[in-house]
Image (spheres, rainbow, N blue to C red):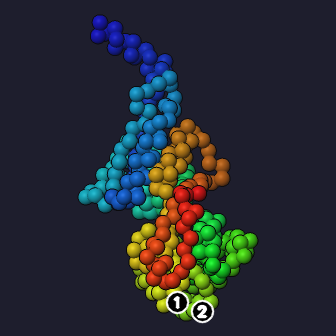
Amino acid sequence: MRRWWFVILLLVVGSGGVARASEVVIVQSARIRPYEEARQAFREALSRQPAVSGAKTLHPHQFTEFVLTDGGGREAAARFLVSHPVDLILAIGGKALSFADRFRQIPLVYTMVPDAGSRLVFHDRAAGVPFSVPPRRWVEVTERCLPRARRIGVVFSPGETGGFVREARALSRVQGMQIVGTGARSAREVRARLEELRGQIDVLWMLPDLRVLTPQTAEAMLRFSMEERVPVVTFAEKYLRRGAMIALVPDYRRMGEAAAALAERLLRGGSLKTGRREVTRRTRVRVNAGIAKKLGAFLDTAWLGGGD
């Protein structure tokens, strides 16, 4: 009887009745909560998708995970990617993307990377979920949370976030606001540019601009905020604890789910006609009411109920 069941199984497999599980390798930069949330959401969302071929399979996707900061994690991931037939790589975090970029023959999806363009050197089959929040959302949140603020100050690098500032400037005019932007070529110029903004702005934006933002310049911006009594709108919750008033934070689970949608498309042989394609994502707004009270700023949070 066992022999007959074995023959039947071979016939089913040979006829395409059972699909081969897709081999998906997840490479994660480090074990931190945002990365873990994105990874779990990616696995859950992709596991709900049907098999790529065949009538059915118990496990349409086989996941193998590596964390680069774990002991030997980088070496183990490299050995696996070289020695196994891998259908897709998910890179979570900047260091993971830089690592995965070398394996250009394997389709690549990335998320949780604020500077993806500078890290993708070799790969031409990559798709990602952008980490930054779009200008529209920055303008909307500033206008709604700080309705008395008319002049928005920002120190930025024209080569990094110049396009972001130009779009935000156009959007802010529609809301009767003004972007008072001052360009800086490097982090060394940030303090001088902040001096130019004294007495000229009602709120300061801290953008995820890697050319001008360092731990030192972030502290300078937060110190400027206290001295000038102007709120800071930033992109990461950690700055709320250090003196920022509002943070626009990507929804990490939604980013993982969006990455799964891209992965499913690539696994089915879909082409990315627009090149390194990116998809939209949901954001959350976090506030520090204590800082608002300390600065004497009017903070309207009545409309807050979720992301966009």
- The residue located at (50%, 51%) in the rendering is 254
* Mark number displayed over residue 228: 1
Q: Nearer the viewer, residue 307 or 6?
A: 307
Q: Amino acid at mark 1?
A: Glu
- The residue located at (66%, 72%) in the rendering is 168
140 to the left or right of 118: right
Q: Position of residue 243 (x, y in %)?
A: 43, 79
Q: Nearer the viewer, residue 172 or 268?
A: 172
139 to the left or right of 283: right
Q: Nearer the viewer, residue 25 or 136?
A: 136
Query: Image quadrant for the N terminus?
Result: top left
Q: Are marks 1 and 2 in contact (CB under 8 Å)?
A: yes
Q: Position of residue 11 (x, y in %)?
A: 43, 14
Q: What kind of element bears circle 1?
A: helix
Residue 164 seen in the figure: no
- The residue located at (40%, 57%) in the rendering is 35
Q: Along the polypeptide, which appears first: circle 1 or circle 2?
A: 2
Image: 219 above or below 279: below
